[in-house]
Image (tube, rainbow, N blue to C red):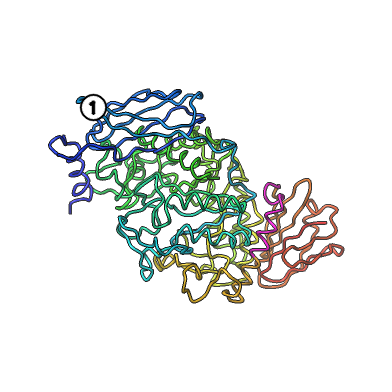
Amino acid sequence: MMSIVKRILFPILFFSFLSLTSLAAKTKIERLEPEFWWIGMENPNLQLLIYGQEIGDYKATLDYPGVTIQSVQNVENVNYLFVNLQIDKSAKAGKFDITLTNSKGKELKYQYELKERRKNSSNRKGFNSSDVIYLLMPDRFANGNPENDSVDGLTEKADRANFDGRHGGDIQGIINKLDYLQDLGITTLWSTPFLEDNEEKGSYHSYAISDYYNIDARYGGNEAYLKLSKECKKRGIKLIKDMVFNHCASAHWWMKDFPQKDWVHLHDEYTNSNHRKSTLLDPHASQVDKIKFSDGWFDKSMPDLNQQNELLMTYLIQNSIWWVEYADLDGIRMDTHPYNDPQEMSKWGKALLKEYPHLNIVGETWYKNAADIAYWQKDALNADGYNSNLPCVMDFQLFFAMEKAFLEPQQWENGVVRLYNSLAADYLYKDLNNIMIFTENHDTDRIMSTLDGDLDKFKLMNTFLMTTRGIPQIYAGIEILMEGKKSYGDGKMRIDFPGGWEGDERNAFTAEGRTNKENEAFNFLQKLLQWRKVNPVVHTGKLKHYIPENDVYVYFRFNNEKTVMIVLNNGSEKQELSLDRFSENIKDFTKGYDILSEQTIQFSNGKLRLNGNTSMVLELK
């Protein structure tokens, strides 16, 4: 069978690189990216990608104080021109013409704009361990504008009856629910990608991006995204943008007409990534296995971008900076981070942090052990000297531990000992406060399916999540015990939030629309989140834990102002816990206020009575 690359991409490339002078179409500037920029950036250099038929035959000029053309770069495809500008500190905000002229004297003009940067833009504070992050998939959360469910020019139309189709959730739907999130105690919003995904099917997940500068019109477009950012800021909610640089969509506009042959990784026949992330860190790995991992395609609809192409990498770096400035972002989440070229992504992180020193960036680091995850954190003490310039990593090791810990009785390695052992590897991390922790996300089984709907285990797990080190992230619907398994298929696992669509049978965004069990879960999580929000001791306080005994895991969070004792009884039986063992943390404290039961517990008899399958969060007095 002929490969997709041979049947589709190579003929397109061959046609694209032919001289097009025989075609009568009129030359025009079809795309210029980025379409505007800002003065006052730390890096004065700006690369413009200009696309149009035979645009490479044109020369560029401009006349604007403080802005000069450093070079004009032609590539093998005559339909592209790359213009490199230098924007001095003396440049003022304003508009000016970029004039393109060919050998026959024909002129094309593009009015370019330099804007003022946002006030205190470079000093923006990113998300951190004081936050709780709420992850959602916009297509499955809430539909605020049914008129944009299907849009002319975008292939896939809304079909809510199709589990794998688009359901119509959008940005306005999220804006409508921001008060709900604020009431729950959320401080940061992370949505899966909003950028245009014009694939024929399955585009609801938006991880196959077909336009890096435009929010999908079915979500509401760029203006709606700006509105979301402003509405979040009004409520003190930070905004993280999900970005995807390892691959684009097969429907991306440049896939029909590459700037250069090495813009994406092409193979003699279709080659899928082997998905063996270990090859990057394995000192014994073969080159052929490394290349298949890094250069193979993530999926047939997701061509692998060649980040070693300098023009492409500059394009991607500028795109990230553009979105941070344009949308007033508080953070970035980079999809499939290790799949990207490590050295080029290190440059990407360095460039972002140069413009925004306090911005936080988290990478998806899907490994099962802490050593592999810690390798990717900025300033890690790696034997090979590699520095990712990625401040935050995702703790999948702890995720896998939590997935099993609360379902098992304690043995040497099982039960809540899994949590203890996972955190015992924290010596590997450079920054313990800058690690994202979670019990589920859009790519995993819903935790309530894993827990078989057990509300007590839900409470234990979330108590741990909100009181251990790191930055907690929860996934939309956990607060109402939503279930789902990957074995059902991704579309069936990622079900709509009940009440997000007009005409839904119930509205779980309201207490009246939730069952008693769902309200108990919501109220429990809300209490934890609202308490956590105002208690710095669990944001950056020290952590000391004690080896679990008899299914009981005890640990402390403490600083100079406060000490909190957390007790997790993962056993089904009542127990009496002797406090003597914990004297180095309890010290002279004589009682504790349990924020969950709202009761004060005296320590006078040296014992602590525990109910089965319960947690306590004791503020020591």
* Residue type at numbered disc 1: Asn
* Residue 532 highlighted magenta (yes or no): yes
Measured along the vertical axis of the image, is residue 577 above or below residue 563? below
Q: Give the range drawn in magenta.
A: 525-541
- Whether 55 is among the magenta residues is no
Percent across and percent down for residue 8 are 20, 48
Circle 1 — which element?
Answer: loop
Q: Residue 43, image x and y in percent? A: 48, 29
Q: Quadrant of residue 32?
A: top left
As displayed, is residue 183 above or below residue 226? below
The residue at the point 50 percent across, 42 percent down is: 324
Q: Which of 154 and 247 is in front in this view?
A: 154
Q: Name the residue under label 1.
A: 102
Q: Which of the 4 quarters of the picture holds residue 518?
A: bottom right
Residue 330 percent across, percent down from the top left: 55, 45
Q: Which residue is located at x 78 percent, y 65 percent?
A: 608
Observer-nearest of 50 and 562: 50
Q: Which residue is drawn at 69% across and 53% down?
A: 545
Q: Specify few, some or many for label 1: CA neighbours under 10 Å numbering under 14, 14-19, or 20 or more.
A: some
Quadrant for the C terminus, please: bottom right
> In screen coordinates, is 50 left or right of 530?
left
